[in-house]
Image (cartoon, rainbow, N blue to C red):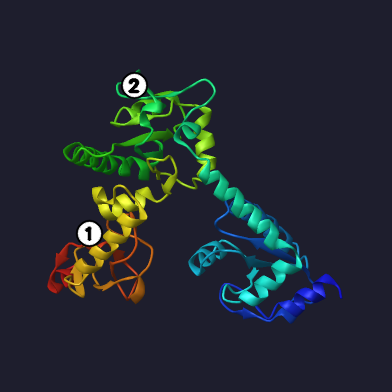
Amino acid sequence: MEALDVCFCLLAHVYTKSKKKIVSELNDKVIGLYFSANWYAPCRKFTQVLAGAYEQLKSCGAGFEIVFVSSDEDSDAFDNFRACMPWLAVPFSDLETKKALNRKFDIEVRLEELRKEEREKHESQTLPNLLTNHNRDFLLGRPTAKQVPISSLIGKTIGLYFSAQWCLPGVEFTPKLISIYQKIKQTLVDDNEEDFEIVFVSSDRDQPSFDSYFGTMPWLAVPFGDPTIKTLTKYFDVQGIPCLVILGPDGKTVTKQGRYLINLYQENAYPFTEAKLELLEKQMDEEAKSLPRSEYHAGHRHELTLVSEGTGGGPFICCDCDEQGLGWAYQCLECGYEVHPKCMRVVDRGSTLER
């Protein structure tokens, strides 16, 4: 049996972004089975290239189609990854078809190799390996000319702050991060606990911009133009700035979502571990029990309803502070407007009707 016939036997159905598509409609077309996963950075980068080539072929009338066969670890990752794909996909829930296709084309062996590479990369990661290069073993401190040995940071929780002066969201987030940084540092001094430090990893376009931006920061920095900057950006797959990657005292990655966690929990997010976040989530759930089920917000004319991930909420951008949010939110059920509970500026209904 031809390979394509085998594929048609295996595929029960595939999906476009909006509806089911019958596999028989793919007859007489060249089919590309795209085995990929959101958790592997090269896959995400190649998907962008493939999407461009796909659109060109389709615009030329080529009888060509692609079917995404996911190796994502959960449905949210699958949905987020598929959102950037203009082609078809085997449903995430169709485990039998995905496993059969993986076996048919020996994908499982390669997947295990990639997972092993990711594990080994994490296990061998240390702070000196990340931040030093062959001719530099220091970071810039305050004042700018001061050189701080990277070895002095070993055993501390470190935030790698990817940002640039030309990036407006970065310029807006930096003062908030400075405030949180200082509060964390003061708390650690008071409690005589392990230290915390931030290292600025600049995407500035010239030395004066770097000097000006770094001059506003109380922490350390990788020197401007140092090759380590590109290495770190690639290693942590930084897709956009500002981005705050947290490293634990052992030099291993704790989370790449430091910015989001700072916005959500402020200084309470420290040390950003799973155990701390679970505790904070439970506290947030308890606090939400005392919040009004609905309110009117000064920045919106419709009534807002308190929602959680389990009641229609999910990841969002707060329409008041323009920062990320997750978990509890006040949401407009009419138009989708959402704000953090902490960003609510409550007004009575009469005030909203007057606007």
Instruction: Tell me if residue 126 comes above or below residue 262 in the rendering.
Output: above
Instruction: Tell me if residue 270 comes above or below residue 278 in the rendering.
Output: above
Give the position of the N terminus as an image quadrant.
bottom right
Instruction: Give the x, y percent position of residue 330.
Output: 26, 68
Which residue is pictured at 43% across the width and 33% down the height? 202
How many other residues sit within 10 Å of disc 1, few (<14), some (14-19) or many (≥20)? some
Which residue is pictured at 50% across the width and 37% down the height? 232
* Cβ–Cβ under 8 Å for marks 1 and 2: no
* Amino acid on which the number 2 mark rests in the picture: Thr
In the displayed structure image, the side of residue 71 where residue 189 appears, left or right: left
Give the residue at mark 2: 144
Q: Front-most of 155 and 205?
A: 155
Q: Earlier in the sequence, mark 1 or mark 2?
A: 2
Instruction: Tell me if residue 256 comes above or below residue 352 in the rendering.
Output: above
Whether residue 312 is visible to the viewer of this picture, yes or no, is no
SS class, disc 1: helix
Instruction: Tell me if residue 94 comes above or below residue 51 in the rendering.
Output: below
Give the position of the C terminus as an image quadrant.
bottom left
* Amino acid on which the number 1 mark rests in the picture: Cys
Give the residue at mark 1: 343
Which residue is pictured at 56% across the width and 58% down the height? 38
Q: Front-most of 320 and 291?
A: 291
Q: Front-most of 221 and 339?
A: 221
